[in-house]
Structures are given as structure tokens and as C-alpha cells.
Amino acid sequence: MRIALAQFNASVGDIQGNTEKMKKLSTKAYDLGADIVVFPEMSVCGYPPEDLLLKRHFLEGNRLAVEDLSKSCPRITVVAGFAEVSEEGCFNSLAVLQSGKVTRIYRKSVLPNYGVFDERRYFRPGTEAVRIVINGIAIAFTICEDIWRLKWIDSFLGEVPRIDIIINISASPFHIGKIKQRQEILSQCAKHFNCAVAYCNLVGGQDELVFDGRSMFVDSSGQIVCEAKSFEEDILLADYKNSKFKIRNSKFRQRRMQPIVEVYQALVLGTRDYVRKNGFSKAILGLSGGIDSSLTAAIAVDALGAGNVIGVTMPSEFNSPDTVKDAQILADNLDIEFHILPIETVLNQFDKLLANMNRWNSTGVAYENLQARIRGCTLMSLSNLYGHLVLTTSNKSETAVGYATLYGDTAGGFAVLKDVHKTMVYQLARYVNELHHREIIPPTVIKRPPSAELRENQKDSDSLPQYDVLDKILIGYVEEDKAVSELLKDGLPKDIVNQVVNMVDKNEYKRRLSPPGIKITPRAFGKDRRMPITNLYPPGFKDEQ
């Protein structure tokens, strides 16, 4: 039997467009001699559809699309994920389409409800296993999380007669280290049941999530036989015979990618899909001559093309000639449209206006933040004028501690680096230059001490710990949920830990008002980490500061 795993970039809500893609891929798989073509979880409607699932007509559209797909592909068995509604409720389901009709439906049984997943809000769990036989080969079906719970799946499939292949359709989003987890889970499952596993994962960006594909075939010994492309659409084809897979159309084997390469590909794909799926063709961003905006611009160009990215530098008297020059060099290196719009006259007018208010002065934090707000207002005005999406350039370290100006450098539609720590920003900047085999990001940008340049001789280190220390604390507190006492046991300085933790807790309101951005760590701000804005935990903690 020949199996095709067809990972493709589905768009949430585009039922017709997704279904048309599936028809074309089914025809291609048939032409390649496949007996069965497997699509990812929720491939008909995209994942996650969230509260679209509360709309009856959306669910009805899923049903009609599955019926249409079955009639259009009668010569090949199709396995498609969709949102199913019945008298029992709403289900995350898998349809088996054969001979022009729906022959079986499997309903996902283990519904994840952690991190970015919220499936129990929408779905009821399935209760029955589904097994079919094609050409004498017995196939059992699972959906994503089902296969991550080995004890559960053992009891669930324990009563099923002989199984030769377990097919798992998935919408598993990317984060650093996720591929290793998947490989281990699939390998364990194959060895436990002494059967092969065919795993088909979604690819593409959806809001803050990026799906990396990397569908795979695993033999009964737990060996990964072959893996599909990462962050790209792909069809992986294999023949199954005598308990083994033989790959038909790919030279790819297991791919060992460096984490920094994975992250960069995720950022590029996530940016491309967010911009294009939301109806924009071009993006605009402020270029300060600093490392964050330089990296964001490089990612945007790789995602959208140089002709679709516009850079604007908006210097004040506090911006050094060197950073303005570096912004110009970067724009030239990227071959993007570039504009210089000095904000000095606007800043002076605001200063005169606000001088009428008691305690206003041109040396305080409010004056510094005013510069950022003028820049944010300028970019949003240009966005309004030309219809371009503003890319925000703040990184995770700044976002975590609130080192950003609300309605200033937080202004924009999409925050490319929202989940990227500052220390990783430097790694990615160096990788950009390696990837392009030339200095896209000027060495002076990478070497210069970071500064917001909102006052004379300002450095980030005036307000924040050194970024290597800051990021260690943030990873422990935000991503690993460590208490202050645990961070201190890790050898981190008490005064700095208390300072950082207090800043993180106090600035939740800023994060709520900031744009969405791409998730690349196991725990990103947003859907992953949902903390109350009004938060007095732990009791007395604020007094200790």
C-alpha cells in the first residue's frame, strides 16, 4: 500500500480554499500511485478555529466541504480533519472518504487544555476507536494529543484487533525543542504497539502560532524512516510492505537543524502568513539603527521580499549620527525603500504644549517616552495612508519587564520578536549574516551597546540588568514558573531577581495592549501565559521591594 502524507498551509476559516487545495493534492497523490492520502488535523477549516466553532453555519460549512471533497476524490482514500457537529455536540474529527462518500468518522478523544490549547471549551471527546482495512493492511486512527498519552492509547486501542499502521493527523505548533518531543512520542508509540506510525502535521502561520510540518513515517522498531520538509508544504510518499516503509519520492531523512535555524524559519513563515493572510501586501517599520529593528527588517525581507518592506528612521537630537548611518546602511544592504523623517520639530511643539502643565520638563521619563510616541504615531499614520502593516520591533526581554513605551514602540500590528529574548536576538542577527553570506546587519549594530537613545548617553543597562542575567531570570520565572526562592538557589543575585520579578508582574497591562507576535518558546506571553493584570500575589511581595 502506498501512503501520501500531504502537509499543507491551511488558513483558518477558508473552508473553500482549503478544500480546493486538498482536492489538488489528492489528485497529485493519486497520480503518484498513492492508495491513501492523509491530511493534517482540522485541515478543512484550519487550526485553531476558536470561537468560529460556536457558529452553527461554520460547522455546517465543514460538513458540506467534507461531502464535496469525498465526491471529488473517489479514486483514492482520503483522510481529512474537520470540525464535526452532531446531535451529541461538536467534535474534532477525522473523516475517511472512500468511493465518493464518507465511510467512517473518528472523533478525537484526548482534548488538550493547556498552553495555547483550549479544546475542552469547544469539543466533546470521542469514545470509539476506528479501524479500517485497505489491501489487507489494518489501520487505526488517532488525532494529535491522542498519541501523546501512551497509557491512554494503550487502553483505548487495546481491544482493537490487529493493527499494522497507526495514522495520526496533527496540528502541533512549533517551539524550540518540540520536534524532539514529537519524535520520541511517535517512536515510543510504534515500539509499544509493534506497528508503524504515519504522522501528518499542519504547516503555516496562524496568528501567534507557527506549524512546522515535518510529517514523518516511523517503522515498528521506533525508527524515524523519513521526515517531510520543515516550515514548507510537502507530500511525503512511502510504500508499506512487510511491516516496513520504503520512501518513494524524497531524499530527505531525519533532519538535524540547529535551534537558531528553526527559530529563524519560524519567524519568517509566521511573519509572511500573518501579513498575507490578513490582507496586507507590504510592511513598514521604524529603523533605529539598533539590533532589534535591524533583525526585524531582515526577517521581513526574507518573508515578503525587499520590494514589500519600507523602513523609516525618525531621529531626534539624542540619536547619534552612527545609528542613523547604520539604519541607512541596513536599508541599502536589504535594498528596501527607506525614509528619514526627523521628529525634532514635532517634539518641540509637543514640549511647548505640555510646558503649560505643572511639573512637565524636558528631562524626565515622560519626555523620553514622548519621542517614542511621536514615532509610533508617525508609523501608524503612514500605515493608515498607504495600507501597510506596521511591524513592532520589541523583543521578549523588553516586553517582559515593560521596557517599552505604550502607544510608542509598542504601536503596530504585529510583533515579530515578541517571543525572542534579547540574547537570542544577537544570535539571530549573526545567523542572518551567515545565511546571506554577507554582512546584511552591520557589525557596528551587533557590537554597539543597546540603547533606546531617548536621552544623552543612554544605555539599556542604566535601567535593566545585563541581558544575559536578565534572560536567565526571565526564562526561570516566565517559562519555568520558578518562585523567587528557586531562582536564588540557581545562584542569581537576590536584588536583581526581586527587581526583575517585580517589573514582570507590574507590566502585565502593557503586554495586554501590545500586538500579537510569533511563539517560538515553550511559554510565550499571550495564549500561553495568561496572568491577571490586577495581581497582588504573593502577599507582601511588593513590600519587600
Image (cartoon, grey):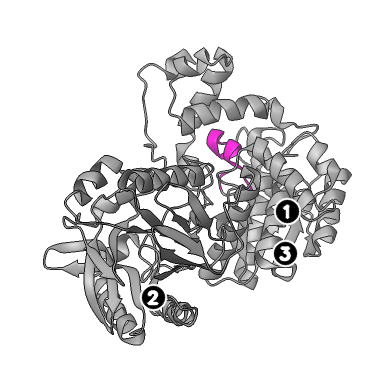
Crowd around label 3: few <14 · some 14–19 · many ≥20 (10 Å): many
Q: Is residue 499 above or below residue 85?
A: above
For label 1, the residue is 346
Q: Residue at x 30, y 43 (%)?
A: 149
Q: Is residue 306 visible?
A: yes
Residues at circles 2 and 1 in contact by the CB criterion of under 8 Å: no
- Amino acid marked by disc 3: Ile
Looking at the image, is 234 positioned above or below residue 531? below
Task: Sort mark 2 into few (<14), some (14-19) or many (20+) by Cα contacts within 10 Å.
Answer: some
Residue type indicated by callout 2: Asp
**In the image shown, does 29 or 281 lie closer to the viewer?**
29
Question: Could you give the CA–CA distance between mark 2 and mark 1, rounded to whole angstroms?
Answer: 67 Å
State the residue in front, 45 or 66. Answer: 66
Residue bearing mark 3: 310
**Which residue is painted at 22% across and 71% down in the image?**
104
Which span of residues is magenta-colored?
393-406
The image shows residue 498 at horizontal and vertical percentages of: 52, 19
Residue 75 lies, in percent from the top left, at: 36, 84
Q: Position of residue 86 (x, y in %)?
A: 15, 69
Q: Residues within 10 Å of mark 1 (few under 14, many from 20)?
A: few
Helix, strand, or loop for circle 2?
loop
At 46% from the left and 78% from the top, the residue drawn is 33
Q: Nearer the viewer, mark 2 or mark 1?
A: 2
The numbered mark, 2 or 3, whose residue comes first in the sequence reads 2
Name the residue carrying label 2: 35
Q: Is residue 262 magenta?
A: no
Q: Tell me if residue 355 comes above or below residue 45 in the rendering.
A: above
